[in-house]
């Protein structure tokens, strides 16, 4: 019975440490990790601006008035 309590205690300690590590990882990802996607979005928007300038639609022609 004593051996079973020792294994149960060890399992509790390991699970507590795993839980604390998971919480620390989530906090790190949420508040401290740099956001690289923000830099990527800025570059991506610039490329679309260049694309739009190159393919501007032709001005609409006005129909000739009959005199």
Image: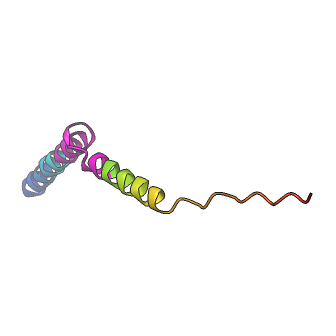
- The x, y position of residue 18, in whole percent, is 17, 50
- The x, y position of residue 25, in whole percent, is 20, 46
Quarter in which the N terminus is drawn:
bottom left
Provide the residue span drawn in magenta: 19-40
Residue closer to the observer: 38 or 61: 61
What predominant SS class does the magenta segment belong to?
A: helix
- The x, y position of residue 31, in whole percent, is 24, 36
Residue 39 in the magenta stretch? The answer is yes
Residue closer to the observer: 52 or 65: 65
Residue 26 shown left or right of residue 6 in the figure:
right
The residue lying at 27 percent from left, 47 percent from top is: 39
Quarter in which the C terminus is drawn:
bottom right
Residue 2 shown left or right of residue 21 in the figure:
left
- The x, y position of residue 13, in whole percent, is 12, 47
Q: For the view shown, which residue lies furthest in the front direction?
A: 67
The residue lying at 17 percent from left, 48 percent from top is: 12
Q: For the view shown, which residue lies furthest in the right direction?
A: 67
Q: How many marks?
A: 0
Residue 36 in the magenta stretch? The answer is yes
Q: Quadrant of residue 3?
A: bottom left
Residue closer to the observer: 13 or 28: 28
């Amino acid at each position: 019975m004593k051996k079973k309590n020792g294994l149960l205690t060890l399992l509790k300690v390991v699970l507590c440490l795993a839980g604390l590590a998971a919480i620390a990882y989530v906090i790190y990802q949420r508040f401290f990790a740099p956001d690289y996607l923000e830099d990527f979005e800025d570059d991506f928007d610039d490329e679309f601006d260049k694309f739009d300038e190159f393919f501007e639609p032709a001005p609409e022609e006005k129909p000739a008035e009959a005199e």
